[in-house]
Image (tube, rainbow, N blue to C red):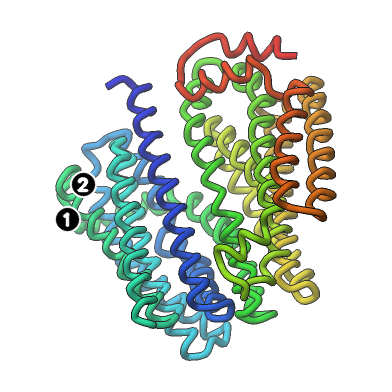
């Protein structure tokens, strides 16, 4: 099989896995939120967020190291997986101990302590499964990753439904999550044993010492990411209580369910950008402005749709008791503009061998996020956490794009600035139409606003026939005259 066909096939499998995982995951969160109610759901969300802050202890950046090294030499697969599984077992004890100490320092009561420890065991199974999925990735057999993710999610869904039907409560729901995740781990172990390598626990002290030194940077990145995404929930529970967490996480889950869109698209263009970086770096510089435009337009259209229909979506999915989540949802929708573009800049940096920039930027933003939450949550509660999320994502994009522009590819060129001004016009006009019509009737405002958005995009030549041809070429991964077309786009 050719490289292009293999990459295309693997991208398709990952797309299926991402959509299935996010879709079923959101449905599980919806069932749990409606069943438990805002306060109990808040405790559930806190437990997951709290243990995620410590997850780096059991992960320690081992998967990316394993993928990289096995991909270079598949004969080393047995040695890496055998030693890393042994290390996982040892790190799991340290992880649970750290979680227990953290809960004690936090002052959690007995029920919250027990709930969070179950969530911690669930994280251990996730970590082992993730390591095994790394083997599938290293061998470029992504269909097995899809199988494991689907089995895991549907197992959790089935057990959650059983718990709800039996009338069980928060701790039992967490047990359903743990057992369903364990089922996915068992399947991953079986696939790895049958198709890739005989699993044997090993403990090569010298080998592990070298491996841990190499994985430190990955581990540091994971620490920043965990803080970046989960600390707001922990701080919110501490300052405002579980009820506020329940409202906030409902809005958060619904908004970030749409992250699969930039994730899938970035996964599709990543191998193309990587190829361009090897063949001709100037091609990437020519593509940057166009890609920013695509991501921004997609984000704006989604923001308009979600902002207008936020109230009925919350009521439909979660019920009337989650009414306080509606304003939080409307605030958080604006973060999608930065989330989409940050996915793009992350893809560009990773494809250009600049992963360390992402680590530094994530560290800076994690500190900023904590600081803003400390200032805003006491006064504004969950709304303050939502605002902190938006500011943090904006800062991440600013740092990353400034580096991109200064060190790699020109972003703030005359042509791109002209496109940006036209984008501002589209956003401003569409926003005004959506706002004023939304005061009258959201069901009229939604299609009218989106039609106005589309009309302005074409009228201001933000999407042309060359764009259409380019999108087809990038998605199909054909080599053509992309570079020349972009240069004459204006």
Horizontal side, residue 218 vs residue 92: left or right: right
Residue 364 horizontal/vertical position (percent) = 68, 54
Q: Quadrant of residue 85?
A: bottom left
Pick whichever, 236 or 363, lies toward us: 236
In the rendered view, tell whether residue 56 sits above or below residue 273.
below
**Depth check, front residue: 303 or 477:** 303
Q: Name the quadrant containing residue 433.
A: top right
Disc 1 and disc 2 in contact, CB within 8 angstroms: yes
218 sits left or right of 130 in the view:
right
Q: Residue at x 82, y 55 (%)?
A: 439
Q: Which mark is residue 259?
A: none
Taking depth in this image into account, of 462 and 186 the one nearest to the observer is 462
Which quarter of the rendering shows the C terminus? top right
Neighbours of disc 1 within 10 Å: few (<14), some (14-19), many (20+)? some
Q: Which residue is mark 2?
A: 78
Which of the numbered marks, if any, corresponds to residue 200?
1
Residue under the point 36% across and 66% down: 124
**Disc 1 secondary structure class:** loop
Q: Nearer the viewer, residue 297 or 216?
A: 297
Q: Earlier in the sequence, mark 1 or mark 2?
A: 2
- State the separation of the CA atoms marked 1 and 2: 8 Å
Provide residue 251's location: percent of width, then percent of height: 63, 63
* Left or right of 306, for residue 135: left
SS assignment at label 2 = helix
Q: Position of residue 175 (x, y in %)?
A: 35, 76
Callout 2 crowding tier (Cα within 10 Å): few <14, some 14–19, many ≥20:
some
Vertical placement of 320 versus 400: above or below?
Answer: below
């Amino acid at each position: 099989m050719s490289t292009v066909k293999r990459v295309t096939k693997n991208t398709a499998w990952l797309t299926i896995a991402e959509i299935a995982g996010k879709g079923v995951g959101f449905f599980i969160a919806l069932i749990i939120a409606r069943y438990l109610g805002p306060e109990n759901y808040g405790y559930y969300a806190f437990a997951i967020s709290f243990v995620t802050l410590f997850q780096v202890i059991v992960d320690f950046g081992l998967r990316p190291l394993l993928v990289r090294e096995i991909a270079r030499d598949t004969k080393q697969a047995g040695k890496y997986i055998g030693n890393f599984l042994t290390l996982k077992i040892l790190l799991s004890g340290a992880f649970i101990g750290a979680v227990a100490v953290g809960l004690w320092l936090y002052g959690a009561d007995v029920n919250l302590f027990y709930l969070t420890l179950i969530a911690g065991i669930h994280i251990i199974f996730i970590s082992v499964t993730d390591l095994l999925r790394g083997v599938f990735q290293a061998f470029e057999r992504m269909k097995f990753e899809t199988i494991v993710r689907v089995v895991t999610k549907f197992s959790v869904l089935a057990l959650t439904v059983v718990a709800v039907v039996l009338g069980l409560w928060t701790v039992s729901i967490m047990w359903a999550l743990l057992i369903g995740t364990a089922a996915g781990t068992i399947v991953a172990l079986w696939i790895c044993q049958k198709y890739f390598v005989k699993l044997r626990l090993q403990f090569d002290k010298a080998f592990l010492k070298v491996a841990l030194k190499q994985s430190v940077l990955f581990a540091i990145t994971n620490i920043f990411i965990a803080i970046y995404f989960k600390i707001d929930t922990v701080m919110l529970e501490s300052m405002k209580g579980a009820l506020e967490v329940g409202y906030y996480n409902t809005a958060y889950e619904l908004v970030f369910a749409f992250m699969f869109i930039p994730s899938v698209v970035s996964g599709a263009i990543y191998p193309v950008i990587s190829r361009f970086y090897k063949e001709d770096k100037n091609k990437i510089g020519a593509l940057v402005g166009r890609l920013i435009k695509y991501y921004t337009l997609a984000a704006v259209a989604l923001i308009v749709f979600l902002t207008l229909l936020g109230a009925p979506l919350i009521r439909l999915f979660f019920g009337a008791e989650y009414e306080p989540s509606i304003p939080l949802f409307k605030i958080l929708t604006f973060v999608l503009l930065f989330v989409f573009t940050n996915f793009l800049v992350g893809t560009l940096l990773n494809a250009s061998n600049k992963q360390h920039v992402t680590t530094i930027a994530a560290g800076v933003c994690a500190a900023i996020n904590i600081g803003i939450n400390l200032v805003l949550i006491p006064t504004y509660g969950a709304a303050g956490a939502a605002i902190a999320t938006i500011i943090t994502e904006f800062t991440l994009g600013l740092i990353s794009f400034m580096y991109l522009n200064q060190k790699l590819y020109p972003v703030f060129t005359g042509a791109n600035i002209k496109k940006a001004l036209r984008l501002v016009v589209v956003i401003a006009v569409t926003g005004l139409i959506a706002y004023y019509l939304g005061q009258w009737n959201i069901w009229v405002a939604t299609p009218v606003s989106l039609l106005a958005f589309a009309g302005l995009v074409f009228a201001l030549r933000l999407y042309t026939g060359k764009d259409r041809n380019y999108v087809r070429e990038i998605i199909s991964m054909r080599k053509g005259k992309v570079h020349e077309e972009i240069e004459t786009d204006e």
